Amino acid sequence: MSITGTLIVQMIVFLILVWFTMKFVWPPITAALDERAKKIAEGLSAADKAKLALADADKKVVAALSSAKDDAAKRLADAERLAQQLVEDAKSRASEEGAKIVAAAKAEAEQESVKAREALREQVAVLAVKGAEQILKREVNAGVHAELLTRLKTEL
């Protein structure tokens, strides 16, 4: 065989190999590559969607955090206002109770003063009778002179 014949046979074998590859090998490879490209495109699309969802979730978290801070501030202000109101109520109740205690103490002091004056009048009346008894050198009858002693008590 000559070189030309070998070249023609190699060319025929090469063409058969190209035809076989194009008919049986190439379609599954292109299908696999297309499927792979499709999966990659879907993955990229899903990644973009996930980025958007993450950005949306971040916005929602920021909004929820802001809302929670506002709510906490409102609750804190309400609690402080309630505490202030309780303190004011306690002060007013304490003032009222103090006023009652002072009034009761004044009333009790007045009663004690009246009792002390009455006891002092009694003692002065007794001392006056004893003094008059010593002056007159005789005993004065308290039953007989009750009116005189009553007048003396009221004058004192």
Image (cartoon, helix red, strand yellow):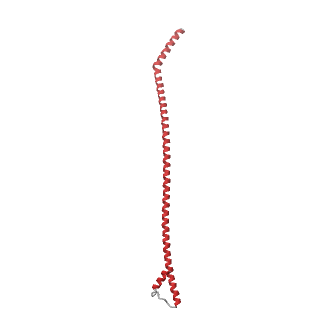
Residue at 51% x, 13% y is: 11
Q: Is residue 52 above or below residue 90?
A: above
Farthest residue in the bottom direction? 137
Q: Is residue 78 above or below residue 7?
A: below
Residue at 48% x, 56% y is: 85
Residue at 50% x, 79% y is: 119
- Locate residue 134, reporting x and y percent: 53, 89
Q: Between 38 and 117, which is closer to the camera in this rendering?
A: 117
Residue at 50% x, 70% y is: 106
- Locate residue 101, reporting x and y percent: 49, 67
Q: Between 35 and 143, which is closer to the camera in this rendering?
A: 143
- Locate residue 100, reporting x and y percent: 48, 67
Q: Between 14 and 155, which is closer to the camera in this rendering?
A: 155
| Number of marks | 0
Q: Between 1 and 79, which is closer to the camera in this rendering?
A: 79
Farthest residue in the right direction? 3
- Locate residue 46, reporting x and y percent: 47, 32
